[in-house]
């Protein structure tokens, strides 16, 4: 769950995402604690890096190595966002995984990542894209932007 609290951001708090948060919320403080992300990538190093970095930002991260295991996790639990590689191993790529996930949760947000595929999305409001290699601040900034976009009604 993402919470927005009234207050002002201060650059003195040494938050590496200060300027992103400031620009997105114009004076409100963003609390990411309790947000849940599912990281889907066939590369265990990418999954580990993203999960560690998200946990450091207060985002609880789970991981899956392919679309089928991701869908099993989605059936058993709730997530606020999927972070998925576009080029997952068959039988389901990242786009198909997100489409099937949205049958379970129609307003689920997703961040596509890829080092090979062009910028990709399934839904213009619910999706974003980051190219590999990426900086963690870029990923977290995209997640913040996704959470602030107005979701369509399910």
Image (cartoon, rainbow, N blue to C red):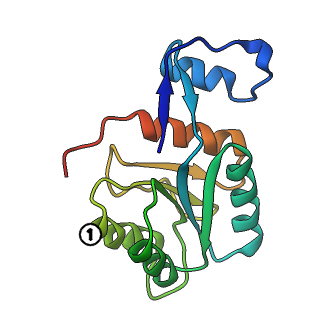
User: At which x and y percent is residue 135?
Assistant: 73, 45
Q: Is residue 49 above or below residue 142?
A: below
Question: Left or right: 59 with respect to 136?
Answer: left
- The correct choice, above or below, for 147 with respect to 22 in the image is below
- For image coordinates 55% across by 47% down, the residue present is 34
Residue 153: give x, y in percent of width and height: 19, 46
Q: Is residue 21 above or below residue 89?
A: above
Image coordinates for residue 149, horizontal then vertical, percent = 37, 35
Regarding mark 1 in the picture, which secondary structure is present there? helix
- Residue 133: image quadrant is bottom right
121 sits left or right of 15 in the view: left
Residue depicted at 71% across the width and 45% down the height: 136
Question: Residue placed at 48% from the left, 27% from the top?
Answer: 4
User: Camera-side residue: 92 or 37?
Assistant: 37
Tell which residue pokes out farthest to the left in this image: 153
Task: Classify 10 Å Cα crowding around label 1: few (below 14), some (14-19), many (20 and above).
Answer: few
The residue beneath circle 1 is 103
- Asked where in the image residue 146 lies, by quadrant, the reply is top left
Closest to the observer: 45 or 74? 74
**Vertical comparison of 53 with 151: above or below:** below
Q: How many marks?
A: 1
Q: Is residue 119 left or right of residue 31?
A: left
**Left or right: 107 with respect to 95?**
left
The residue positioned 54% from the left and 57% from the top of the image is: 37
Residue 97, image x, y percentages: 41, 73
């Amino acid at each position: 769950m993402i919470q927005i609290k009234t207050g002002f951001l201060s650059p003195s708090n040494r938050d590496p995402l200060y300027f992103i948060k400031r620009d997105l919320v114009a004076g409100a403080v963003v609390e990411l604690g309790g947000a849940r992300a599912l990281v889907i990538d066939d590369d265990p190093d990418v999954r580990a890096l993203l999960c560690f970095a998200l946990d450091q930002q207060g985002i609880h991260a789970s991981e899956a190595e392919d679309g089928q295991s991701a869908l099993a996790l989605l059936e058993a639990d709730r997530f606020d966002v999927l972070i998925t590689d576009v080029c997952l191993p068959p039988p389901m790529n990242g786009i198909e995984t997100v489409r099937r996930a949205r049958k379970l949760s129609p307003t689920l947000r997703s961040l596509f990542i890829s080092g090979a595929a062009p910028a990709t999305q399934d839904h213009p409001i619910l999706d974003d894209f980051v190219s590999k290699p990426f900086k963690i601040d870029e990923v977290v900034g995209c997640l913040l932007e996704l959470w602030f976009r107005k979701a369509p009604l399910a």
